[in-house]
Amino acid sequence: MGLKNANFRLVSALILNLVILVGCAGFSYRYYGLSEVDYEHGTLLGPKEKDDLPFSKCAPNAESKHPCVIMFTKEFFAFKQDYEDTKQKLKECQKN
């Protein structure tokens, strides 16, 4: 019971530090919305062809004025790497 409690405190502290870091530093990855675009043409390319979607999915609708955001490849892969690193650190933390 003491080990589980210690792990919980450690994970809680890690999450709190991440929240504070993101809150203080801000979201450092640039992303963009779309404006004055013809949503009738084009395709959103997924990781695999079966994941592709029509660009019309990004058209403003009742739920959202801007349902899509755009990231440049370099920003996206840095964001993805940070996510993967954080996931791995959490797994390592939970092992102890």
Image (cartoon, rainbow, N blue to C red):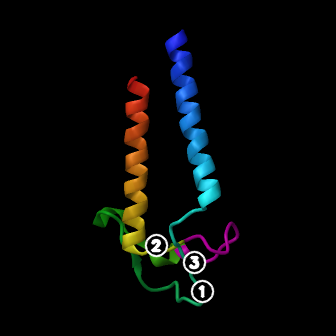
The overriding secondary structure of the stretch rendered in magenta is loop
Q: Identify the residue position indicated by label 2 in the image.
A: 71
Quarter of the view holding residue 95: top left
Viewer-side label of 1, 2:
2
Quarter of the view holding residue 80: bottom left
Separation of residues labelled 2 and 3 (CA atoms)? 9 Å
Separation of residues labelled 1 and 3 (CA atoms)? 7 Å
Q: Residue at x 70, y 70 (%)?
A: 62
Stretch of the chain drawn in magenta: 58-68
Badge 2 density bin: few <14, some 14–19, many ≥20, Cα 10 Å: some
Furthest-left residue in this view: 48
Q: Residue at x 59, y 54 (%)?
A: 22
Q: Is residue 5 left or right of residue 54?
A: right
User: Does the magenta-highlighted stretch encompass residue 86?
Assistant: no
Q: Is residue 41 left or right of residue 63?
A: left
Q: Secondary structure at mark 3?
A: loop
Residue 65 picture location, percent across and down? 67, 75
Cβ atoms under marks 2 and 3 closer than 8 Å: no
Q: Identify residue type, mark 1.
A: Ser
The label number, if any, that marks residue 33 in the structure image: 3
Residue 60's place in the image compared with 90, above or below, is below
The label number, if any, that marks residue 79 in the structure image: none
Query: Disc 2 or 3, which lies upstream in sequence?
Result: 3
Furthest-top residue in this view: 1
